[in-house]
Image (cartoon, rainbow, N blue to C red):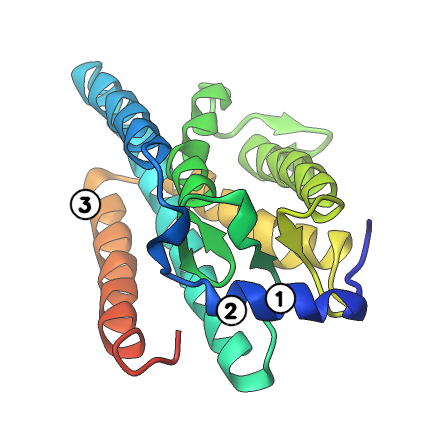
Amino acid sequence: MLFGDPGLKSLADLAKAAVRDPSNFNWTFIAILAFVVMIYVDEIHKKNYKAIAAALMLYSVHWLYEIANAVICYVSGYALWTVSPESTSYILLIGVSWELSMMFAVAGFTSKLLPADKNLKILGVNNRITFAIGSALFFSLVEIFLAGTPAFIWVYPWWGALPVFITTYIPFFLASYLIYDKEPKVQKKWIISLASVNIVLLAVLVPLGII
């Protein structure tokens, strides 16, 4: 399934009604959170702060995108991507389930695969950019699979694999891998700033019923 299907709008409508509905809640919510916390604790213990910064940066960008997707849903009636209530223990925003969000919380740890030499070029391109494109391609292929299941819904016929790859996953991993080599002060500035923007947006838009 490479592009969206307007015929899935009825399923998207059901998902909109299930945002932050606890009906499907189960204890996998806590188990997944525990595993994610364990990963961060292990990286902190190893003092792998560069990878932690990369992971937090990707997670912050992820939340900005999810907020934007929810606003698009409010304005146009449908989100670019939607998660189904049957596939999750809890829907945070229209396009992100708890399980999906926790996956993005650790996705930035793929930065541990980056070459030690930040200036190394692969096929004439800086390796950080090459790896970002490669990671984006992998995640886009996974999303194509998800879009072919009841778990993930694309309704717009112009939205699909290629737009996801270019406009979503490449920025995710570019932000993550480029922050990896920055000085700690720069890392903190970017992460705290972006996280603060997300918190303010959530604090304002959720109570207003926009997202």
Residue at disc 2, secondary structure: helix
Q: Toward the viewer: 89 or 187?
A: 89
The residue type indicated by label 2 comes to Lys
Check disc 1 and report the residue beneath it. Answer: 12
Q: Toward the viewer: 111 or 139?
A: 139
**Above or below 39: residue 56:** below
Position of residue 64 measured from the top left corner of the image (x, y, whole percent):
40, 62
Q: Specify few, some or many for label 3: CA neighbours under 10 Å numbering under 14, 14-19, or 20 or more.
A: few
Q: Quadrant of the C terminus?
A: bottom left
Check disc 3 and report the residue beneath it. Answer: 185
> Would you say 114 lies left or right of 162 here?
left
The residue type indicated by label 3 comes to Lys
Residue 85 in view of the camera = yes
Q: Residue at x 70, y 70 (%)?
A: 9
Furthest residue to the front? 23
Q: Are marks 1 and 2 in contact (CB under 8 Å)?
A: yes
Residue at disc 1, secondary structure: helix
> Would you say 127 lies left or right of 122 here?
left
Instruction: Name the N-terminal-most of marks 3 and 1.
Output: 1
Check disc 2 and report the residue beneath it. Answer: 16
Position of residue 169 measured from the top left corner of the image (x, y, whole percent):
59, 48
**Above or below 142: residue 38:** above
Q: Are marks 3 and 1 in contact (CB under 8 Å)?
A: no
> Would you say 86 lies left or right of 54 here?
right
